[in-house]
Amino acid sequence: MNFKGISYREKPIESDVGSIRKIVRSSGYFSAEEVEMAVELVQENLSKGESSGYHILFVEINERVVGYSCYGPIPCTRESYDLYWIAVFHEFRGRGIGRELLERTEKKIGKMGGRRIYVDTSSRDQYEPTRSFYLANGYEQEALLKDFYSPGDDKIIYVKQL
């Protein structure tokens, strides 16, 4: 990946709320409720900071937010973290931005004492690129919860050991 003007930052600003909404919508995968859930995690971080338990890493190109990850420690565990969201604007997908964002997120989790990262996704066909992305980046399927989201829509949980 070789982009001019690419940068990363961790501290959210108020305008990121709208950026996150647009990024998550751009995938075409998520319901309105899911989009608002992604936004709520950013708002929680804005209001409470690190005590929210949600950490965010933004990727910008020429000062435009084009992707982000949201992650945090799993309560009541040692060294286990959830990757709640990782998303890149649809128009920037397939250029290595997501992979670089994931690698940087994993390094941050490792520096925070994380040793295992969990991520989950749907079994619906439209999520095949998402599942392939996790597998290509060293995640392994750990569990499958039948009919979790709805009949015929299983929850697949991946894990990566750091």
Image (cartoon, rainbow, N blue to C red):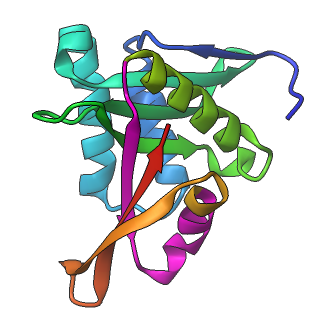
- Tell me where residue 84 appears, x and y as whole percent: 35, 43
Judge by depth and name the residue closer to the eye, 3 or 83: 83
- Tell me where residue 150 appears, x and y as whole percent: 21, 81
Task: Left or right? Give the position of 149 relative to 11.
Answer: left
Q: Is residue 6 magenta?
A: no
Residue at horizontal 36 percent and vertical 32 percent from the top: 71
Q: Quadrant of the rendered structure where residue 83 is?
A: top left
In the image, residue 17 sits, relative to residue 88, either above or below, namely: above
- Tell me where residue 161 appears, x and y as whole percent: 46, 44
Q: How many marks?
A: 0
Q: Which residues are magenta?
A: 113-133
Q: Is residue 116 magenta?
A: yes
Q: Is residue 21 visible?
A: yes
- Tell me where residue 159 appears, x and y as whole percent: 41, 53
Q: Quadrant of the rendered structure where residue 43 is?
A: top left
In the image, residue 36 sits, relative to residue 127, either above or below, namely: above
Residue at horizontal 33 percent and vertical 48 percent from the top: 35
Residue lying at the far left of the rendered structure: 76
Residue lying at the far bottom of the rendered structure: 152
Q: Is residue 84 visible?
A: no
Judge by depth and name the residue closer to the eye, 80 or 34: 80
Judge by depth and name the residue closer to the eye, 9 or 137: 137
Judge by depth and name the residue closer to the eye, 140 or 103: 140
Residue at horizontal 37 percent and vertical 14 percent from the top: 14
Task: Left or right? Give the position of 45 relative to 100.
Answer: left
Task: Left or right? Give the position of 94 relative to 14.
Answer: right
The N terminus sits in image quarter = top right
Q: Quadrant of the rendered structure where residue 121 is?
A: bottom left
In the image, residue 139 sits, relative to residue 69, either above or below, namely: below
